[in-house]
Structure formats: C-alpha cells, structure tokens
Image (spheres, rainbow, N blue to C red):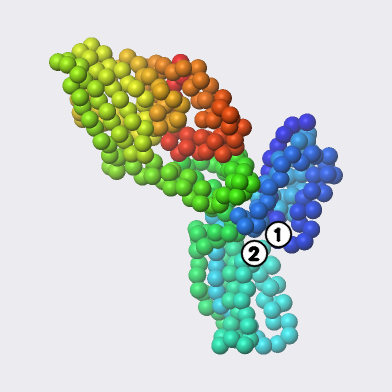
Amino acid sequence: MNKFSFITRIPNEPGALHRVAKIAKIHNANIHRIHYNYKIDLNTVFFEISSSKEAYEKIRNELNELGYLQISLEPVHYLKFNIFLPNRPGALFEFLDNITSTNANIAFLDFDERSNRHDKLTVGLTLDNTSTVNLLLENLQQRYPMEILEYDAEGEKLDDTVFYLLFAQKIREIIGTEDDFLFKLLNDINHIVQELTRLGENPKKVFESIITTGNTLKNTQGDKFFADVQIININNDSFLYGIQPPCGGNIYLVESKDELVMIDSGYGIYYGDMVKLFQHIGINLKKLKGIYITHADADHSGAGGLYDVKSYLNKGTLDIINKTNRAYGSAVEECVLEEVYTKLINLFSNFNPQPM
C-alpha cells in the first residue's frame, strides 16, 4: 500500500463529501488525513490516503467523472451582473437552467421584490475559462435584459471561495512553475492551514505575509537591488566588509593581500546582484577561498552553492539543510509550520546551498 494525496472541489450541497468517502471505501483506500474549512475555502477538500496505485487511479477517475477532482490551477473568472427576469412563475428556474448548462458556480444571488429595484436579480458567478464566460453571456443576452457590473478574469474578487487556487496562482507569479508541482505544494500549504486553525490563528493573514515576502524578494533584484556596505580597514592590506542586502541576511567578507573568505552567503536570489556589487566595490572573487555558514536559514546559506568554492558548516546546520526544516533537531521538530515555511522561503529565494 502506497500513500497518495489528491485535492477535490466539491459542491456545497448535502452528501457531496459522503460521495468522496464512498468512492475511497469501494476501492479499499484508507484515509489518513482530510481537511476542509468553509471559512478558508468553501469548496476545497484535501485528502491523503493509502491504497494500491491501481486503486488510486480508479478513485481519481471516478472523482473526475463526478467533476470533483481538482485537475487545473487555471484562473477562475468572476462575473457579477444584474438581470431582469419576467414576473411570472418559473422565471428563476428557467434562468438557473442556463447557469447549470455552462457549469458556472453561483457565488451569490440577491433579489427582493420589496426593494426599489424589485425587477433586478443580482448574480455573482465563478467560471473556469473565458470561453465559458462568453458562452454564458451570449445565452443570457439573447433571453434577458442585463447589466454587467463586474468581470474579474484574475479571480481577485473570490477571496472566500477559491482561497487555495488564488494562493497557488500568486506563488506561480513569484517563482513560475507547473501545475503538478503546485498541487504537491498545496498539500503542504494545507498542512499549515490545518495547524494554524487548531492554534486559533488566522491562516489568511499568515499567507498574506508569506506572499509579501516572496514578492519583496522578487521585486528587489536587478535595477531595484540595494545594499548597505561598510568597509573597515583592519591593517594596511586587510579589510572587513559588511553588506546588508534587502530582506536581511548580512554577508561579511574578510580580505587579506592573498585571499578572501566569506561569512554567510545571503539569499540565492541575490547572487547576480551581489557579484556586481563586489565588482563595484573592488572585491576580487578570484581570491575567494571558502564560505563559512553560521546557520541554515535561506538568508545566510542560500547562495553558497553558486560560488565556485567550498562551504564550511557544522553537522547540525547540514542536517537542517538536508531535511528542509529549520526546526530539525529541536523540541519543535515535528511542527508543520516550520517545515512548510522553510520550504516556501527556500522556493522564493532560490535556495542553493553547498553543504560540504
């Protein structure tokens, strides 16, 4: 029996989750982890199971046939409009037939005949792609007078309905990656959500902070790179350089007449900018003999593997790098938050150490 994971997007209706559990039971799969929180994402449910590979494929196929399996991370479109329905029995039913035929999901409906706009039904929908949006609009405009109020092709208006999807898209904007990798990453991210929920914390605020960190790293390269530099003359031919690039992670270099050593390498994402800075302030990297890493965080060891010299670090630091968990070896080693946070920051910062 092997362990597998999958992500579902199930309709918010009675029995939907039960159907998924029944499919797993039929194929003799044991569910090890499940997480659903409507306050975070109304439709997304995470599963981890153990089963044979053949059973896992059958489960995925059956979920896909139901339309429950999350198989794409393409942007979800949000459409909001007013529609003028005829005042007769069955009018709403006929309108909803058009919605169902295009597989659109209703985010909200608003109608009250006692209001000063009693002839208007306000509708919010989520749809998978542009062609679906166009098809729906064409069908509705042939049947009803309507007013388009909002159309959001990036999904930013969907906050509480597709949280994980939007988060994955934001990660892709920062690091650029394929859906398969993002699906695996989303399972790890969901572990953080589950842990934070148990601790009574707000997962959305935590993830906003993570995305802010990723964007800051991305947006402080090249022309936007900056650093504070201090140069101390130790004696006639020896110097100490202290460099503070963006987002922390000080880099120190000690230079003598014949050689140069580095203490901590900074984030990997700044490697190219740091090389240009070294050239600008007169540091000759051909003299570099080694890099001494104080600890395994990405802002201290992340660029070690990009320099053509050995890095020197203690065994505990090496173990943390190999386990991709900055809590490794400590009392909180099993903390999901530390492990997944480490993985995300390493991704955002182009973590490339050189353990020797």
Mark yes or no: residue 194 visible: yes
Of the numbered discs 2 and 1, the one sitting upstream in the chain is 1
Which of the labelled discs sits on residue 313, or is there none? none
Mark 2 closeness class: few <14, some 14–19, many ≥20 residues within 10 Å: some
Instruction: Please name whichever residue, 155 or 301, is drawn nearer the observer in this view of the structure.
Output: 301
Q: Note whether 59 is above or below 324 in the view shown.
A: below
**What residue is at 38 percent from the left and 44 percent from the top?**
216
Q: Is residue 9 above or below residue 110?
A: above
Front-most of residues 166 and 99: 166
What is the quadrant of residue 131 in the picture?
bottom right
Q: Position of residue 191 (x, y in %)?
A: 62, 42
Q: Is residue 190 visible?
A: no
Q: What kind of element bears circle 2?
A: strand
Name the residue type under label 1.
Pro
Marks 2 & 1, CB-CB < 8 Å contact: yes
Q: Name which residue type carries label 2.
A: Asn
Q: Residue at x 55, y 71 (%)?
A: 80
Q: At 85% from the left edge and 44% from the top edge, which residue is drawn?
A: 26
Q: Which residue is mark 2?
A: 105
Identify the residue under disc 1.
11
Give the residue drawn at x 64%, y 67%.
106
